[in-house]
């Protein structure tokens, strides 16, 4: 729990309808197994103690008394365990019978949450047996066993174990209505909602059920743990499948396939992430409600050695091939239509691009071609300038030329060796010293040419730098750092590669061939002389692997994770790919460079925001240029 993780489980044990003792035995087995798996909160289905389909047997005192007796036995079995349990049962209170969830911990029942929305349509006729708890009614007290237990709208507070850990519960139909009880609970502070359900299967209902829960968890910025009655519940005209899932802020963390074997699915949900999201989403407003009672549960904190949660090594890139193709198409359209607007608004006669044969300039050219096609412009007015110098290799030069020919753009070659050498003489620099002056003079000479050529042709300079380079400050100030519109400024390096590959796969053979060779070329600024004709300066050898830096950037900027937490999840995500000390080395580099290079981002040219992570000083990152990184670096081990 040090990093905000809470292990939750959703269980659907085999049951026998109306056999409370048998059901309690199975539930106790699940609870003990869950506690061994370090589960902090375990959710059972609706009316799990009796079975949901007991029908008029709910009117029999024998069943209600048995349910009470077995629920007390379930509670007793949790003594000494560190797992909160939510079990479904009928609870009698005067003339009313409530369909309720019992919240149990360490041998004690802390409260009952009654169902508020009782379905009485189609195959459901719960009003025949159960009383709906009045919405927004204050909590009442119910005698259960030898104790008085609160029943009603309850917020369960486990802040003793983790700051901000509060949860609520609702039952099945409560989720499907226009104003679910969980809305008020979330606004009152619940970051986790548990749903005990008995939702029967009909065609299409599974996906609809997931869509509702996903959207609801996203709208409330919470985790949603859903447990549906298992296949053994099926009787008469109703079929149940034990469909269970766990969502976190609209993202699916775990799911049991319908009709899967009984048992528990687990996921580690991130409470600190949810709290940070709520803090940053200024339209999420907390509220206090007089009808919601807070009950504290003294949950004991656990330290999980490993997390039950998968973090993609490439969080900017969808894992599904179909999703990736759709994402690439959408991004290229966003870039192209944004650039089209700038071209149209500025009445630009040309689009001028510095073409190097590398990934970023290739993507910028492809986007520009797409924008020209949308606007119905002649691609010949895309002016690509290749500017060979000391570090240019035959491979990248050839690819730049082939790319322009395949696209139908106009290619200009301006060799800058003589101009840069003259500049070295002017400033008194020894050209044999391959330092930052040697490198940056080339980058600034290229930018000067691009800007002046754009003026000469009545055009604009299209920037090529990507999001990953901006995060690391891997750009020459007032060199490749500057343009009149940066089409790649919100695209991370790991995604640039996929965008170029997507374009290659939908292109003709000539263009596909050159794009695939660009993809195979090492990432390099090509500012140092080649070695034996090959690229000598490889970016990732200098600043570190981009897949690591993109991983760091995503969780640092998108969710505000601390460096030590990023290190914790990176070790798990990249296990077997990078040694821990390698991850730590490049994470330190990321933090230092991210803080130290902010001055470059403070004066970025415009560029389209295409994802949730952007470093634009006008939008998503208002950061002082001279902030000290010590607070963040001290979070990392020495």
Image: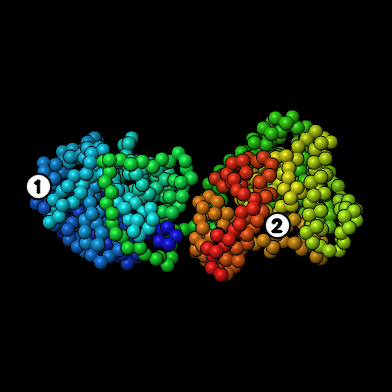
Q: Mark 1 packing: few (<14 Cα in 10 Å), some, or many (20+)? A: few
Tell me the quarter of the image containing the N terminus. bottom left
Q: Is residue 63 left or right of residue 452?
A: left
Question: Looking at the picture, how far across and down is residue 569, in whole percent?
Answer: 50, 61
The colour mode here is rainbow
> Residue 377 sits in which quadrant?
top right
Image label count? 2
At a point 19% along the width and 62% down the height, the residue shown is 76
Question: From what the image shows, is residue 40 above or below residue 227?
Answer: below
The answer to whether residue 37 of the structure is visible from this angle is yes
At a point 43% along the width and 41% down the height, the residue shown is 284
Which one is in front, 410 or 487? 487
At a point 60% along the width and 66% down the height, the residue shown is 585
Which one is in front, 483 or 162? 162
Q: Secondary structure at mark 1?
A: loop
- The residue that label 2 is drawn on is 523
Mark 2–mark 1 distance (CA, rounded to whole Å): 74 Å
Tell me the quarter of the image containing the C terminus. bottom right
Question: From what the image shows, is residue 301 above or below residue 58?
Answer: below
Q: Secondary structure at mark 2?
A: loop
Question: Looking at the picture, how far across and down is residue 328, in whole percent?
Answer: 59, 45
- The residue that label 1 is drawn on is 60
Q: Mark 2 packing: few (<14 Cα in 10 Å), some, or many (20+)? A: some
């Amino acid at each position: 729990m040090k990093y905000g993780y809470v292990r939750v489980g959703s269980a659907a044990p085999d049951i026998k309808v109306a056999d409370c003792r048998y059901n309690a035995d199975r539930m106790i087995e699940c609870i003990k197994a869950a506690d061994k798996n370090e589960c902090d909160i375990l959710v059972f289905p609706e009316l799990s103690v009796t079975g949901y389909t007991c029908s008029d047997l709910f009117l029999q005192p024998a069943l209600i008394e048995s349910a009470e007796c077995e629920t007390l036995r379930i509670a007793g079995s949790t003594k000494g365990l560190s797992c909160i349990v939510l079990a479904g049962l009928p609870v009698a209170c005067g003339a009313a019978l409530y369909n309720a969830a019992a919240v149990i911990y360490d041998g004690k029942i802390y409260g009952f949450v009654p169902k508020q929305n009782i379905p009485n349509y189609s195959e459901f006729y719960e009003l025949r047996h159960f009383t709906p708890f009045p919405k927004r009614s204050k909590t009442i007290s119910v005698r259960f066993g030898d104790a008085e237990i609160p029943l009603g709208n309850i917020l369960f507070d486990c802040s003793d174990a983790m700051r901000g850990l509060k949860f609520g519960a609702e039952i099945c139909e409560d989720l499907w209505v226009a104003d679910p009880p969980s809305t008020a609970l979330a606004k009152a502070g619940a970051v986790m909602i548990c749903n005990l359900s008995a939702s029967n299967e009909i065609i299409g209902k599974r996906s609809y059920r997931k869509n509702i829960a996903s959207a609801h968890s996203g709208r409330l910025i919470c985790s949603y743990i859903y447990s549906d009655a298992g296949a053994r519940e099926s009787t008469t005209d109703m079929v149940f499948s034990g469909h269970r899932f766990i969502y976190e802020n609209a993202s699916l963390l775990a799911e049991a396939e319908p009709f899967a074997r009984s048992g528990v699915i687990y996921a580690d949900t991130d409470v600190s992430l949810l709290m940070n999201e709520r803090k940053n989403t200024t339209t999420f407003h907390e509220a206090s409600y007089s009808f919601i009672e807070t009950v504290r549960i003294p949950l004991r904190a656990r330290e999980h050695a490993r997390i039950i949660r998968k973090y993609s090594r490439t969080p900017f890139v969808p894992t599904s091939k179909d999703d990736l193709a759709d994402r690439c198409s959408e991004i290229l359209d966003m870039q192209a239509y944004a650039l089209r607007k700038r071209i149209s608004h500025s009445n630009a006669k040309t689009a001028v691009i510095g073409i190097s044969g590398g990934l970023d300039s290739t993507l910028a050219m492809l986007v520009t071609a797409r924008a020209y096609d949308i606007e119905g412009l002649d691609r010949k007015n895309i002016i690509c300038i290749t500017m060979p110098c000391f570090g240019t290799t035959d491979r990248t030069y050839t690819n730049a030329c082939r790319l322009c020919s395949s696209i139908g753009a106009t290619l200009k070659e301006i060799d800058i060796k003589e101009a840069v050498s003259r500049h070295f003489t002017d400033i008194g620099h020894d050209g044999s010293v391959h330092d930052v002056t040697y490198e940056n003079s080339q980058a600034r000479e290229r930018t000067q040419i691009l800007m002046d050529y754009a003026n000469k042709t009545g055009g604009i300079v299209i920037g090529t730098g990507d999001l990953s380079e901006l995060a690391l400050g891997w750009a020459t100030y007032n060199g490749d750092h500057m343009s009149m519109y940066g089409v790649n400024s919100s695209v991370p390096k790991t995604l640039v590669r996929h965008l170029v590959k997507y374009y290659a796969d939908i292109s003709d053979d000539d263009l596909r061939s050159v794009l695939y060779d660009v993809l195979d070329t090492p990432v390099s600024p090509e500012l140092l002389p080649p070695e034996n004709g090959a690229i000598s300066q490889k970016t990732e050898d200098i600043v570190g692997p981009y897949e690591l830096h993109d991983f760091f950037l995503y969780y640092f900027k998108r969710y505000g994770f601390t460096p030590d937490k990023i290190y914790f999840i990176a070790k798990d995500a990249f296990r077997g790919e990078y040694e821990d000390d390698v991850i730590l080395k490049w994470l330190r580099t990321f933090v230092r460079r991210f803080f130290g290079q902010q001055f470059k981002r403070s004066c970025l040219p415009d560029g389209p925001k295409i994802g949730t992570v952007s470093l634009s000083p006008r939008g998503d990152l208002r950061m002082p240029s001279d902030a000290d990184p010590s607070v963040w670096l001290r979070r990392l081990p020495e």
